Image: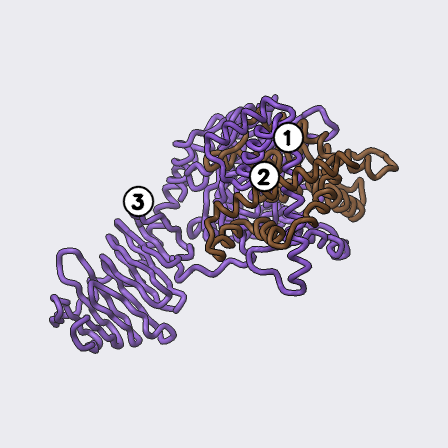
Chain colours: A purple, B brown
């Protein structure tokens, strides 16, 4: 290698380290490294210089800035996951702060971003570009767009707003919204005084009230007061105070009095009634559809968490092809409400909570794992959904990472004393904004590719080696038998294992029938 | 399956080995992934996987710490290798990465190459000491935090490319200095 070649390589190395290489340069670097052993040795040297420089910078920074607190964007090398593992952790921690700070894109504390919570949603069709929101979701500043249906939004300020679709509502702060189109019915308690609605050039400021606002493209906008008083103002006119049972139509730059029409606005009570009716409809739909999964020729395990009386500590396996003893034992856990009123779920909370199952499965070449869960938190690096006892090649471990990624691990024999585990993660899906919501998690493996689904959508996939066969055998749901804590903090109200890989359409159908 | 060892001792041993091997494992991952920040993320995930599997790791009886560490590194680098592959699959669509074949080749050769790492780092420390103050400050800014070089460029009213060029010259000079020093010793 002459100097010019060496210098070219070094420029490519630097680009690679900085993530600034063009595709062409990247291809060139790859070709050179593939062809030349000398180039690879130089690359290794430069990689060591890269880590050495980072070490040096961190050490120097630590010296110059002690004892100042870590600035944001820095963190100690994250060993917190180790702490709860052993009693001696505290002693060891002292010796563990050997790492200087290591920069990270991850902020130490994330800022609060919500202004409201979506408290109810009944028969809602969300606009494609507005993004679907689930009940219980934290709503950040931004726009809610409903094609049809109705929702109840509870603002952090305490104000409660029923939005009837079709509607477009922009949440600005916890005390201010803009109604771009549609109909809202607002209830503003004392603690939320000053709640403001911007609507088609008018500004409506509440003084402790119930009031309604309508904005439609064609007809003039209207403000109706049902209780208390509000102040309405337009750009070019003095504010007007409106009292109970008053209503105005906004015509250009003026107000015209009209009769107040409370029944025209959907009330919270009516929305709640519809919600209950809607839930029992969905519950009924699920009861009809669940048989499909149980009857599937590939179904090995199908738990509904809904059959036994509460004193029963055994889960019946509803899979049609199940061996007579294919049930499971509940260890710990507590019954909680499931997806709908009247549907039960098993809540995993404590260190010991688990469902212990024995799935006498035939030799499997493919698998589908499905679970409806409501995750409360992901406090551990591994939060087990399913863990086989066996560590034989082909054994499966299915869990959620601390970042909310679905992860499937398959044990692999590489001829060494211990098995290796090949894994494929999804993109983060069970993120804090989805905590507290019922989610369908599914992972399939068809012998070559692992695919992860969240609520029926593909959220990640990757190639895997092809194991001779897959094992479930004796396994645990929500926990595992190893020496470290990996138990789930979630409620589960349906769980299935199939010995075939379901397709994307099928998984979407399971989601549609069960959401 | 877990009560064959005292977890406290086992944990202490794990932490000791990981501490001792951390630098080399990071260097190993950088050579497969390119970006140090990616390597750090992957190593963090890999260390979790290592601890989970540590009970199955058989270091073998040895009186010599260097041998125990080499055994650990051989085992740990495989765990890290799979974690790196997993990471690359997830990132496949969003960034450029080395092909699977190249990663395989690099991984195999790099394990043997890691015995050089400590000597390189020692030499590097000596070589950085010879840089002038502005050069040291540039290195510090570039390596302390992702994106901080661009921020520094803004502060100085310079084009980021100018600083990257300077940084690359420094890297080149440091590599030459390290090579020379290693050849001398």
> Residue, x 61% and y 31% (percent of image)?
A422
Q: Position of residue A53 (x, y in %)?
A: 65, 46
* Mark 2 burial class by Cα count in 10 Å: few <14, some 14-19, many 20+: many
Q: Which residue is mark 3?
A: A128
Q: Which residue is mark 2?
A: A386
Q: Position of residue A127 (x, y in %)?
A: 29, 47
Q: Position of residue A368 (x, y in %)?
A: 51, 32
Residue with the most extreme right position? B63
Q: Which residue is mark 1?
A: A411
Of all chains, the one bearing label 3 is A
In the rendering, which numbered label is found on residue A204?
none
Report how many numbered discs are placed on residues in the image: 3
* Mark 1 burial class by Cα count in 10 Å: few <14, some 14-19, many 20+: many
Q: Are marks 2 and 3 in contact (CB under 8 Å)?
A: no
The quadrant in which the N terminus of chain A is found is top right
Q: Are marks 2 and 3 on the same chain?
A: yes
Q: CA distance from mark 3 to mark 1?
A: 40 Å
Assign a secondary structure to mark 2. Answer: strand
Q: Nearer the N terminus, badge 2 or badge 3?
A: 3
Of all chains, the one bearing label 1 is A
Q: Are marks 3 and 1 in contact (CB under 8 Å)?
A: no
Q: CA distance from mark 2 to mark 3?
A: 34 Å
Q: Is residue A192 left or right of residue B158?
A: left
Q: CA distance from mark 1 to mark 2?
A: 14 Å
Quadrant for residue B113, please give it: top right
Q: Is residue A38 left or right of residue A448?
A: right
Viewer-side residue, A402 vs A45: A45
């Amino acid at each position: 290698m002459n100097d010019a070649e060496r210098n070219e390589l070094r420029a490519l190395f630097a680009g690679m380290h900085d993530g600034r290489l063009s595709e062409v340069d990247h291809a060139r670097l790859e070709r050179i490294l593939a062809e030349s052993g000398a180039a690879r040795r130089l690359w290794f040297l430069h990689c060591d210089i890269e880590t050495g420089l980072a070490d040096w910078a961190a050490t120097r920074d630590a010296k110059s800035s002690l004892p100042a607190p870590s600035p944001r964007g820095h963190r100690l090398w994250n060993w917190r996951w180790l702490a709860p593992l052993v009693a001696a952790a505290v002693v060891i921690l002292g010796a563990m702060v050997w790492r200087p700070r290591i920069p990270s894109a991850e902020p130490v504390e994330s800022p609060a971003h919500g202004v409201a919570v979506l408290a109810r949603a009944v028969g809602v069709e969300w606009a494609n570009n507005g993004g679907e929101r689930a009940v219980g979701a934290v709503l950040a500043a931004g726009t809610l767009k409903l094609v049809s249906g109705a929702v109840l939004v509870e603002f952090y300020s305490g104000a409660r707003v029923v939005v009837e679709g079709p509607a477009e509502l922009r949440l600005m702060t916890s005390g201010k919204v803009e109604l771009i189109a549609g109909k809202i019915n607002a209830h503003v308690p004392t603690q939320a005084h000053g709640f403001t609605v911007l609507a088609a050039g008018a500004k409506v400021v509440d003084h402790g009230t119930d009031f309604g606002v309508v904005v439609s493209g064609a007809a003039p906008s209207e403000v109706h007061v049902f209780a208390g008083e509000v102040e309405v103002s337009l750009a070019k006119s003095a504010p007007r105070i409106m009292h109970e049972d008053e209503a105005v139509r906004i015509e250009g730059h003026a107000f015209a009095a009209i009769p107040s029409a409370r029944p025209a606005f959907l009330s919270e009570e009516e929305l709640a009634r519809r919600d209950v009716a809607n839930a029992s409809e969905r519950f009924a739909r699920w009861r009809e559809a669940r048989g499909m999964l149980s009857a599937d020729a590939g179904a090995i395990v199908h738990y509904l968490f809904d059959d036994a009386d509460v004193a029963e500590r055994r889960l019946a396996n509803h899979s049609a092809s199940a061996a007579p003893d294919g049930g499971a034992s509940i260890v710990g856990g507590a019954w909680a409400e499931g997806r709908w009123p009247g549907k039960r779920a098993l809540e995993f909370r404590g260190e010991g909570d688990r469902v212990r199952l024995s799935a006498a499965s035939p030799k499997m070449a493919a698998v589908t794992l499905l679970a409806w869960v409501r995750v409360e938190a992901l406090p551990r690096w591994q939060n087990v959904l399913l863990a086989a006892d066996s560590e034989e090649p082909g054994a499966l471990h299915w869990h959620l990472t601390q970042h909310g990624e679905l992860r499937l691990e398959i044990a692999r024999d590489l001829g060494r004393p211990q098995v290796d585990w090949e894994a494929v993660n999804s993109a983060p899906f069970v993120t804090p904004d989805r905590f507290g919501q019922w989610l369908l998690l599914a992972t399939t493996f068809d012998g070559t590719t692992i695919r992860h689904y969240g609520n029926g959508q593909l959220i990640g996939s990757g190639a895997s080696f092809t194991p001779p066969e897959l094992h479930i055998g004796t396994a645990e749901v929500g926990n595992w038998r190893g020496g470290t804590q990996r138990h789930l903090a979630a409620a589960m109200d349906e769980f299935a294992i199939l010995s075939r890989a379901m397709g994307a359409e099928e998984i979407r159908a399971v989601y549609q029938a069960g959401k | 399956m877990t009560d064959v060892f005292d977890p406290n001792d086992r944990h202490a041993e794990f932490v000791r080995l990981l501490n001792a091997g951390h630098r080399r494992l990071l260097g190993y991952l950088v050579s497969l992934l390119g970006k140090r920040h990616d390597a750090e993320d992957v190593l963090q995930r890999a260390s979790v996987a290592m601890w989970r599997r540590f009970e199955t790791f058989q270091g073998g009886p040895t009186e010599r710490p260097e041998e125990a560490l080499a055994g650990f590194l051989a085992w740990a680098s495989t765990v890290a290798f799979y974690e790196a592959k997993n990471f690359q699959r997830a990132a496949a669509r969003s960034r450029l990465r080395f092909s699977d074949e190249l990663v395989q080749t690099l991984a195999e050769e790099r394990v043997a190459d890691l015995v050089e790492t400590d000597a390189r780092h020692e030499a590097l420390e000596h070589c950085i000491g010879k840089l002038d103050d502005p050069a040291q400050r540039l290195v510090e800014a570039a390596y302390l935090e992702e994106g901080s070089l661009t921020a520094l460029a803004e502060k100085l009213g310079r084009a980021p490319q100018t600083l990257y060029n300077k940084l690359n010259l420094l890297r080149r000079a440091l590599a030459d200095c390290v090579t020379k020093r290693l050849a001398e010793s």
